[in-house]
Image (cartoon, rainbow, N blue to C red):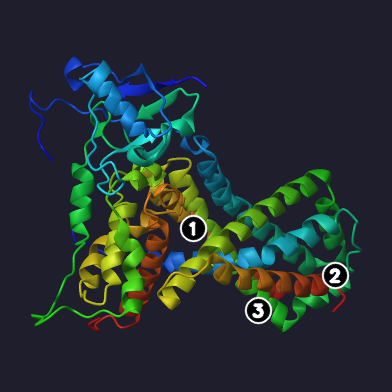
Amino acid sequence: MSAGKRSNEPIVWILFGMGGFLVAFFLPVHVLFYGLLFPAGMVHAPSYQQTLALVRHPLARVYLFALLTFCFFHAAHRMRSTMLDVLNLRHLNTVIAFLCYGGALVGTVFTVWLLMTV
Amino acid sequence: MPQYTQYQPKEHRPKMSAYWYLDNWHYLRYALRESSSFFVAYFCVLTLVQLAALGTNATRYARFEAFMAHPAMIIVNAIALAFFLLHAITWFNLVPRVMMRQILARPTPDIISSAPNYLVWFGATIILALFITGVL
Amino acid sequence: MSDTIILEVARFNPEDGGEPSYQSFEVPLRPDWMVLDGLNHIKDQLDGSLAFRWSCRMGICGSCGMMVNGVPTLTCETLLMNYAPGPVRVAPLDHFPVVKDLVVDLDDFLAKLQKVRPWVVRKDDFKPAREFMQSPAQLEAFHQFSLCINCTLCYAACPVSGLDPDFIGPAAIALAHRYNLDSRDQGIEDRLDIVSQHEGIWDCTVVGECSVVCPKHVDPSLAIQQFKLTATKEWFKSFLLPRGKH
């Protein structure tokens, strides 16, 4: 390898890094309540109206937008490297990158749309 | 690279196992840590589904809640939680160390770089739990 | 306790045209013997055709790295006793082409090492009249990364260097980082051109095993992640100020 083009990886890496912090700080408590304690009936779930009011608060919308967007890109970047390294699919690098980051982009669009219409 | 001649016969190039991550515990832990990403993607999509149900009407949201109460969903979400915790712990032990070293330009004890993250994690969990359960 | 131990040593002779195999040798198990002493016993007393590299016997030359029971190890500073009652399996370092028995081909590694310019690069014609002064803080910034002895254990531990032969690899990047952090150096742009390509830092997915096996506690994994931060900063700088000289 000679002195060549520097990689554009920093753009996805910084999104991965921000998402990594958000996943670590916030996702465990989300899945703990919405995925386990509420459905299992161990904690009383707030009503539909309460949940709707919570999500409609402007700060909650901003929070959910940041959380979901960065987490989508975090997952996309890591799923890509998992498929390249753990599953050794290096020959499919371009397709995998397109699907992962493309998927994150689609996720972001849905996030914006749902948060605006909820 | 030298062209091989009869005096420089071919070298042996061992092939890497397709299951190299089973070779030792560190590799396996790495593979598990990276696999957390699939659960992150799953849970983000699940949250979008929840938002869509919330935005539609109360009946749709009740159906979503019934779906979440299915035992299979609870098991999947318990596994997701385990993966998120693995991610959080490995992340807090690694990333702040890199950032701290970059800022201070000298070696720092891991406890100084990691500890604040665990405090923020704890605080954020409490505050979010209060909002999610409707106490606040 | 038995006073001997079995060493299962990888054998490969290119002139036979054969495949690699393991050969067992019984060597004395002495409390002060390292794995390397066992290999030297084989070479001196049992089979003079066994090929392996070694030199200093004190963990500084970095030439006796081998896989011992599957772990990249400096054989001159690892007690044979640790593996009692045995058997101990000794193989050439993973992810390198094998020349003969336990000897690996380091040409590719040395070429990569040279590419990252691991020496002090000056862009001006600075001619110091006396020693270049460095404060203890300036020394501390890079000291840890300067302890590398090029033993290549980190390459053998790194699955990415096995999966992608073009990956520049832990030691070379750690040494590039060591010179970037040196207050005398001005070569960071040259190194970024090499190391911030995909086959440089961005190939690394932080398995972290390089830092675990490093006998000198260089922590190449930390160096690579820091390098990523630097490269990211530079990337955004050139993105926001495309024509700026930076």
Residue drawn at x 20%, y 68% as measured from the top left: C190
Disc assigned to residue C84: none
Q: Chain of mark 1?
A: A
| Residue C234 image offset from top left, x and y in percent | 33, 75
Q: Is residue C86 above or below residue A19?
A: above
Do marks 2 and 3 share a chain?
no
Residue drawn at x 90%, y 57% as measured from the top left: A42
Spatial CA distance of label 2 from label 3 is: 19 Å
Quadrant of the drawing holding the C terminus of chain A: bottom right
Q: Quadrant of residue C163?
A: top left
Within 10 angstroms of label 1, few (less than 14), some, or many (20 or more) residues? many
Local SS, label 2: helix
Name the mark nearer the viewer: 3 or 1.
1
User: Which residue matches tag 3?
Assistant: A62
Q: Amino acid at mark 3?
A: Val
State which tag comes first along the sequence, 3 or 1.
3
User: Which residue matches tag 2?
Assistant: B133
Within 10 angstroms of label 2, few (less than 14), some, or many (20 or more) residues? some
| Residue C188 image offset from top left, x and y in percent | 24, 71
Q: Quadrant of residue C240?
A: bottom left
Residue drawn at x 49%, y 19% as measured from the top left: C2
Q: In this image, C28 relative to C165: left or right? A: right
- Res C239 visible: no
